[in-house]
Amino acid sequence: MSEENCLFCKILNGEIPADIVYESDTAIAFRDINAKAPTHVLVIPRKHISTMNDIEVDDETVIGSLYTAAREIAAQDGIAEDGYRTVMNCNESAGQTVFHIHLHVMGGRQMAWPPG
Ligand code: AMP
Ligand code: ZN
């Protein structure tokens, strides 16, 4: 999907509203509209990257910053000590539905393993 038609680029540009909980120079995070856990936040890079397969070596700092965001969000939501999960789905078989990479940060309940 091109950047112009990307739902998450539209959230980044303020064209579509979202409950934004974190912002940095390289990433933003907002609550998932269809939360599957008490905390369910999506961390996205400001740079449009469609899938994990499209991450380049030069993106390593940006990708690292998604985890910094996850850690801070977990602390903000008070789930850091109990524990939480980060997931990035890649392509259809993994269940990716929005083609702008995003790290799911989920917690506030006991998580099952393995995921479905
Ligand atoms: P994935 O299936 O890994 O691509 O995850 C996409 C996630 O985006 C799903 O959990 C959706 O509930 C979520 N989502 C879709 N549209 C929005 C939106 N407008 N605001 C917040 N989250 C959304
Ligand atoms: Zn995008």
Image: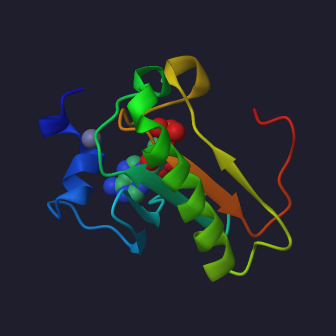
**On screen, residue 94 above or below 97:** above
**On screen, residue 105 above or below 113:** below
Q: Nearer the viewer, residue 92 or 12?
A: 12
Point out residue 28 in the picture as x, y percentages from the top left corner.
Answer: 38, 62
* Labels in figure, total: 0
Q: Quadrant of residue 50?
A: top left
In the image, ligand 2 is in what quadrant?
Answer: top left
Q: Which colouring convention does the figure follow?
A: rainbow
* Residue in view at x 68 percent, y 77 percent: 75
Q: Quadrant of residue 12?
A: bottom left
**On screen, residue 23 above or below 61:** below
Q: Is residue 30 left or right of residue 49?
A: right
Q: Which of 60 and 11 is in front in this view?
A: 60
Q: Quadrant of the C terminus?
A: top right
* Residue in view at x 86 percent, y 71 percent: 82
Point out residue 34 in the picture as x, y percentages from the top left corner.
Answer: 50, 57
Point out residue 115 in the picture as x, y percentages from the top left corner.
Answer: 77, 36
Q: Nearer the viewer, residue 110 or 27?
A: 27
* Residue in view at x 60 percent, y 25 percent: 94
**On screen, residue 19 above or below 33:** below
Point out residue 46 in the picture as x, y percentages from the top left corner.
Answer: 30, 51
* Residue in view at x 50 percent, y 54 percent: 65
Q: Which of 65 and 36 is in front in this view?
A: 65
Q: In which quarter of the image is the N terminus?
A: top left
